[in-house]
Amino acid sequence: MSSMTLYNYFRSSTSYRVRLALNVKGLDFEYKPINLLKAEQRSEAYLKINPLGGLPTLVHGGKNIPESFAIMEYLDEVFPEPALFPKDAYLKARVRQVCEVINSFMHPMCNLKTLNYLEKTHGYDQAKKEEWAGFWLPQGLETLEKTLQEFSGTYSFGDTITMADLFLVPQLLTCQRFKVDITKYPTLMKINENCKKLPAFEKAHPFKQIDTPDEFKNK
Ligand SMILES: N[C@@H](CCC(=O)N[C@@H](CS)C(=O)NCC(=O)O)C(=O)O
């Protein structure tokens, strides 16, 4: 049995990021599904390992690590090959910038707890949620497009996969889910298409997981 367990959910973009990091590094892990729609992330047992009730959490050698970015940096330190950051300090900072735009600005806007709050407190239906997403997410996409026009090659930073790609691809799928038009961003589209061809990305895709409902399989 693998010494790593990932508590995650097929469609969670933060879970998808970590699956990508594990696959890129060729690491085996046990997949523990936590169903967000059944609020399993707020069960007493899960809150013991992740007090904020967010996915994913990695358990490695009996120690748990919540927060996707913390998990991915940990994996990069413990399993350094292939490296997820460039060696150059400036480029490394710009890779982190991309990750942060996604992690701190874009992801929280359409997180389940944010949308649940809007629904319960302000009566948002699906159309209003899409309008909300359509206001916030393009601001992040424009920033990413401008940034990656400067740095991209085949992938976000030149021709080597970095942490930036592992954040970008899942976030673009979330944008599509909320009907945000990603075709307006040619650099992001190019990177997305190139990444999606890689086996590590194919394997991590939300529609290919053990907890993927039948309606999403083989799409
Ligand atoms: N910053 C955290 C966010 C974790 C998070 O909230 N993940 C979402 C899934 S993408 C979640 O579990 N949401 C549950 C909820 O909002 O109740 C991370 O990167 O791990």
Image (cartoon, rainbow, N blue to C red):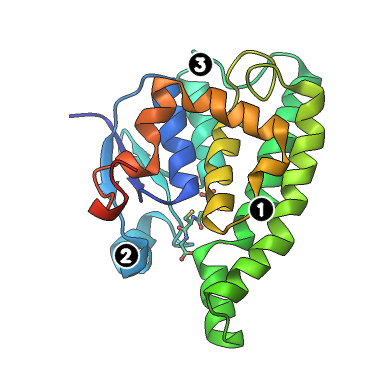
Image quadrant for the C terminus?
top left
> Which residue: 29% across, 32% down?
29
Most foreground residue, 93 or 198: 198
Q: In which quarter of the image is residue 39?
A: bottom left
Amino acid type, callout 1: Met
In the displayed structure image, the side of residue 140 where residue 56 appears, left or right = left
Decide if residue 208 is on the left or right side of residue 165: left
* Residue drawn 37% across the image and 62% down it: 36
- The residue pinned by badge 3 equals 80
Q: Is residue 67 left or right of residue 156?
A: left
Quadrant of the image occupied by residue 131: bottom right
The answer to which of marks 3 and 1 sits earlier in the sequence is: 3
Q: Where is residue 41 in the image (x, y as percent from the top left)?
A: 37, 62
Give the answer, above or below, for where 218 lies relative to 94.
Answer: below
Q: Which of 149 and 33 is in front in this view?
A: 149
Front residue (pair 214, 24): 214
Among the two numbered marks 3 and 2 on one chain, the one whose residue lies closer to the N terminus? 2
